[in-house]
Amino acid sequence: MGALDEGHFNAELENGVNLGGCVELGLEGGEPETPAIEDAVRVLLQGLGEDINREGIRKTPLRVAKALREGTRGYREKAKDVVHSALFPEVGLDNKIGHAGGAGGLVIVRDLDLFSYCESCLLPFHIKCHVGYVPSGQRVVGLSKFSRVADVFAKRLQDPQRLANEVCKALQHGIKPAGVAVVLQCSHIHFPKFESAFLDSNHEGWIKLLVSSGSGVFEDGKADVWADFLSLLRFRGINTANIHANGSDQCWCPSHSFTKIAPANSAMMSAVASILRSLGEDPSRKELIGTPARFVTWLMNFQNCNLEMKLNGLVRNQRDSMKPDGDISFGEEHLCSELNLPFWSQCEHHLLPFHGVVHIGYYCAAGGIPIGRSLLQSIVHFYGFKLQVQERLTRQIAETASSLLGEDVMVVVEANHTCMISRGIEKFGSNTATIAVLGQFSTDSTARAKFLHSIPNSCQSGL
Amino acid sequence: MGALDEGHFNAELENGVNLGGCVELGLEGGEPETPAIEDAVRVLLQGLGEDINREGIRKTPLRVAKALREGTRGYREKAKDVVHSALFPEVGLDNKIGHAGGAGGLVIVRDLDLFSYCESCLLPFHIKCHVGYVPSGQRVVGLSKFSRVADVFAKRLQDPQRLANEVCKALQHGIKPAGVAVVLQCSHIHFPKFESAFLDSNHEGWIKLLVSSGSGVFEDGKADVWADFLSLLRFRGINTANIHANGSDQCWCPSHSFTKIAPANSAMMSAVASILRSLGEDPSRKELIGTPARFVTWLMNFQNCNLEMKLNGLVRNQRDSMKPDGDISFGEEHLCSELNLPFWSQCEHHLLPFHGVVHIGYYCAAGGIPIGRSLLQSIVHFYGFKLQVQERLTRQIAETASSLLGEDVMVVVEANHTCMISRGIEKFGSNTATIAVLGQFSTDSTARAKFLHSIPNSCQSGL
């Protein structure tokens, strides 16, 4: 069971508060831990060079504190009670050989969307959770309880394999079935670093990891019952023993690949350690020792340096080089576009990532020199790597692109916001589009339609 | 704005309690309305011929009461406060012609999964909600607020068009933008009636309806800004005026097509009216007058009549006719299967629908007469149309099929449970698989694998 020893586990089961829906949520503002987190977030914002009294981020410390407390409420919940209240008698087979119902009939709950916080870097990660069990003792458990128990452990700082083990063990203890199987498909956002984002155009946005855990009849990863389970997860022909090397010490979190740790900002590091303590964690736990340094390193990607100044120089130079001799004959213009320029950014309301693609449409004179995709990508990265809101990002890209491309510019930004899934509303599939229209695009609906129709379905672009 | 007049709307905005996460959830057991709903549910269970002290349904009245109160918590919530706390200053364009940021840049939040209760039949329906607005006054609203406001109105007894109108109007009032657009894709489960389920093998399981509502610059359904909005919803070329005849009196709920209303059970009808009152509704409201009759008619599909008795006779006759003279030579057996037999059922823990498909595998002797799909479909319907749990349904189908098909039978049931989405956990994409294995299948993993691999990906079967 990996990092989890028996004593630690039982303490977790016993010490939590009762799990009754989302009772915690309404009370969090008044919890003693919340102001401590708020103070720490103020230190982080100041470390980023932000004015903490600026309107957009004035309440960010409170929002972050509430979101973090809510996102880690599993520390204050008890898996045992969840299960015990929902065991139902259910007979098995009557005078026949085989397994069914409350005596041996495999039950699988698939595709539970969860999220958790990565203990290595404090960013949320997404989990598609599949749970199965083989009933015994002529009793079954209410189906919704798998989701509730998994959530008790997901709502903590986690590592995928430990999460799978903890969910598996809690269900085994709570239901006492013939066996429990857990398979988690985890996705961790993978930001390029600010410096390399401009160079690496093929950066892969996600780290994916498939882990499993089994107890009882599922203890042996090669048992036949695993084949039944995996068949119904559509992972046909996959051997659980190969899913992930159980017990491997290699951490999946991309923050471990940071080669350059930012110059130590000891106030920011202490602030992150203080947040860990406020969430109920021990910052000296082995897996958490490097977390403050990794989180601060990542956060400093979004430092409020004066990017606009640099960018203005870049754009002016580029514009001059585009019109070398001023005698290009401007004939009929045609619609040009650059689609699916990836961006990564940080929501200033919640200090959580949002990311997606930018589409830029503009008119290019016949005979004009086409603008390079890489320059537009640079503009996108410049405005992405800071504390942002999507509406502002869209406007800033449009304004800057316009100074390069002429007055007729349209920008569409399509994004997934982590804050839409990792807080109370948990809208996993939702995404957001924003539009800025400049010049001709603001009055010409045909031009807008022509550009909008050229944008591919965002489902295909990985949103 | 259809059924919604100004006075009614304002009262709803003012009278609710503050919306803070899911504060209500933990308190519901103690609310005075809950015992009244429990009493009403007991009457309904008795009307179905159930023993209300039976272990599986003993706590069903409490579960139903909590789920209904939680699912209609919007009556006690106030949309206005949700929005007001999350307006952020955001400038528009600087010295350029056009629209962007907090002054005219269209913002769209797509694919918010919600559910609501149909006011005509009290069954939950699913909503894919898309909201857009055009900011004005140099301010934008936090993205998560669209989901929270939509949820305030979704968590009531609703009709799709009224829901769209209410969400649109609340956002217009709360944000005071240039305009708000709402598009809802609604899906309502469509049960076949018990009697006709056996005849109609092509019954369509869902009623779908697309509705829209617009205010401000979206008030005119033909306005250009609708084209931008719909393009980004991937509804390209659709005219909102055609989405749904706004103001049409025709109700989408399939319960309106019930030709035969069940013999009036006045105690059950009164119980449903009492539930409506306990949720904060007026049972004499025009749209609710027929609701108790429609709900009771639908519920009586799951009456606990002694189906097993009838079915045993059916199966015995069929079996006799299959072996007319007893001298069929049994050679080598081969694996047969009937896949994707649809079923509809009612979760006895929550009185909520679950539905999906059943796959049956068995061995057929070479030269044996193949069993008809329609007989297996009848068995599935027999066990579906009652208060059930999926584990029991799976076992019962396996046992009955076995008395017809021989001792080597495997049954897989794949289902969506409304109780997994319409209560606290709201796991929209999740689904459940259960297995029963009889005879040879319980020991022969190769046989199981062969059958499991023949089951098509359930995504394709509409689960």
Image: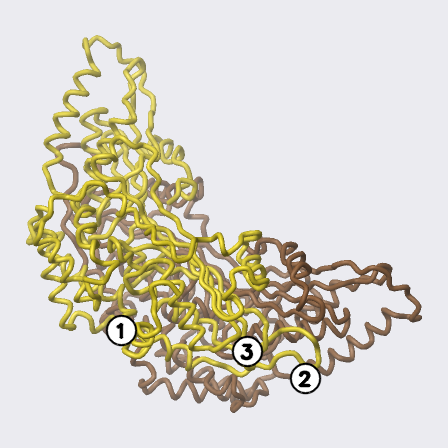
Chain colours: A yellow, B brown
Q: Is residue A67 visible?
A: no
Q: Position of residue A309 (x, y in %)?
A: 10, 31
Callout 1: SS: helix
Task: Specify whether A186 is left or right of B376.
Answer: left
Camera-nearest label, 3 or 1: 3
- In depth, the one of B366 and B12 nearer the eye is B366
Q: Position of residue B462 (x, y in %)?
A: 56, 56
Figure quadrant of the N terminus of chain A? bottom left
Query: Which label's residue is closer to the chain start, 3 or 1?
Result: 1
Residue A76's tag is: 1
- Which residue: 77% across, 72% down? B404
Camera-nearest label, 3 or 2: 3
Mark 2: few/some/many CA within 10 Å (<14, 14-19, 20+): few
Mark 1: few/some/many CA within 10 Å (<14, 14-19, 20+): many
Q: CA distance from mark 3 to mark 1?
A: 30 Å
* Callouts 2 and 1 close, C-beta under 8 Å: no
Name the residue tied to disc 2: B306
> As shown in the figure, which amino acid type bears the numbered disc 2?
Asn
